[in-house]
Amino acid sequence: MYQQRMNGQNIINSFNNQFVTAIIGPRRVGKSYFIQNYALQHPHLKWVFLNMDKMPDRVQVENNQLERLIQEHAKQLIGLEVKIWVVIDEAQKSPAIFDQVKTIYDNFKGKDKIKFILSGSAVLSLHKLSAESLAGRIELFHLQEFNLREATLLQEQIPLTSLFDKLVDTDPSTSITEYINQLKPFKPILENQLAELLIWGGFPELLQLPTSNEKISYLNNYLQTYLEKDVRAIETITDINLYRNMLDIFAEQTGSIRDELRITSALGCTRDTLKKYRGYVEATLLYKDVYPYINSSLKRLVKSPKGYLLNNGLISLLTGIADIKILEKTGTIGHRLENWFLNELYIWCERSSFRQHINYWRTSTGIEVDFVVVKKPYVFPFEVTYGLVPDSKKIRSLQKFLQNEPKAQWGYYIYRGEFVIDNDKKIMFMPCWAMN
């Protein structure tokens, strides 16, 4: 059964305009499946599917024959007969493709004779391709792993709006209260699914597997394919063992402030090598640095980023901890919850075409807020904790931020407890199972 994606309508809207549509995201988050489902719903259109993972397709493109390849598959000349819809998967693997897409696009611009849809498991600007070749011609979308709503497979029953979207309402306390009351019948299902996401992450195929052994096997295969197919293809990545060891460290330190000296010492490499290798993990959308929130009125802030290996399943595989009780005992469950919540924030932010930022806030004295989302003109501070009862220290951190940032009207405390609004402190205590 096809699962409707939270931001899918934005992508579909792009399918129906003249620009090149590009969808990027990690391997196995459902990019190709999303496009194929759209094609199945529109069988009357003339589709051409190319894949730069396939050597014959890539060779023709590298020989500057993209237009000929399209016409061979479509069995018609471009510009004659009906419009051609061209889907190119793993586009970033063929740098030669972007100039050719640009040329064909420009030749038929305004004639509604060809539509390009590109997808890839690495940032298209990895080779500075989309910026240099397709500037002003491309719409770029990110597809993440399943969020909590998508993973529950209850989209027809759960309210179609998102709680995050209520945060910008004129009276968010009222609309959020109504929303959470609507969700309460689904609380047990959402709580159970959240526990799964904390251990296994949100790769769609993995969530359908019935046993832990099958999920571990899936993740092993995923990592092996990533290392052998993606990483080995990069000439500047010369030490696969070092790269794998770096992933182990990222998994163990997810959610922590990055300590370059300790990491380079543990890996036995230079800072330049670490920067280069980390850059590729980020380019393949498996890792993200979250930088500190900077405001001129907030002094003496910690400036190092916090690093996140974004998929909880890969963290389970690399750390060897795939049991929620062990995570609770070791105290590392909080970082898993942060990781899940960061994915939810990215999905929320990507619904808007305006530029937005996800940061964290921490002073040199240790006062910290886990995430600060800047959606101009608003600022939203989030404290995320696995606890059932609010922690007074974390509450004070939110209060301190609110005192120093007038653009933040409310603070949001995400935890496993009950929904409570403290109008005096201007803090909403939000159950994590409702955050989707």
Image (spheres, rainbow, N blue to C red):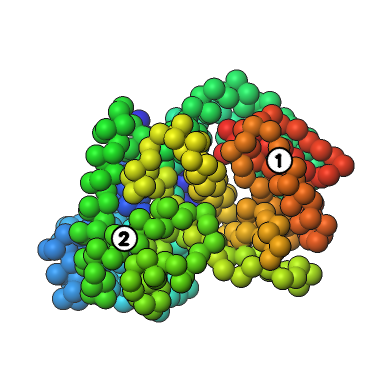
In the picture shown, does residue 326 fall above or below 10? above
Decide: few, some or many residues near mark 2? Use Cα within 10 Å; few <14, some 14-19, many ≥20.
some
In the picture shown, does residue 342 fall above or below 231? above
Decide: few, some or many residues near mark 1? Use Cα within 10 Å; few <14, some 14-19, many ≥20.
few
The x and y percentages for residue 1 are: 35, 30
Residue 216 located left or right of residue 426: left
Secondary structure at numbered mark 1? loop
**In the image, which disc is placed on residue 245?**
2
The residue that appears at 41% across and 58% down in the rendered structure is 250
The x and y percentages for residue 68 are: 18, 68
The residue that appears at 26% across and 76% down in the rendered structure is 236
Query: Mark 1 sits on what residue?
Result: 391
In depth, the one of 367 and 39 nearer the eye is 367
Q: Amino acid at mark 1?
A: Asp
Residue 249 located left or right of residue 58: right
The residue that appears at 20% across and 59% down in the rendered structure is 228
Q: Amino acid at mark 2?
A: Asn
The residue that appears at 20% across and 70% down in the rendered structure is 61
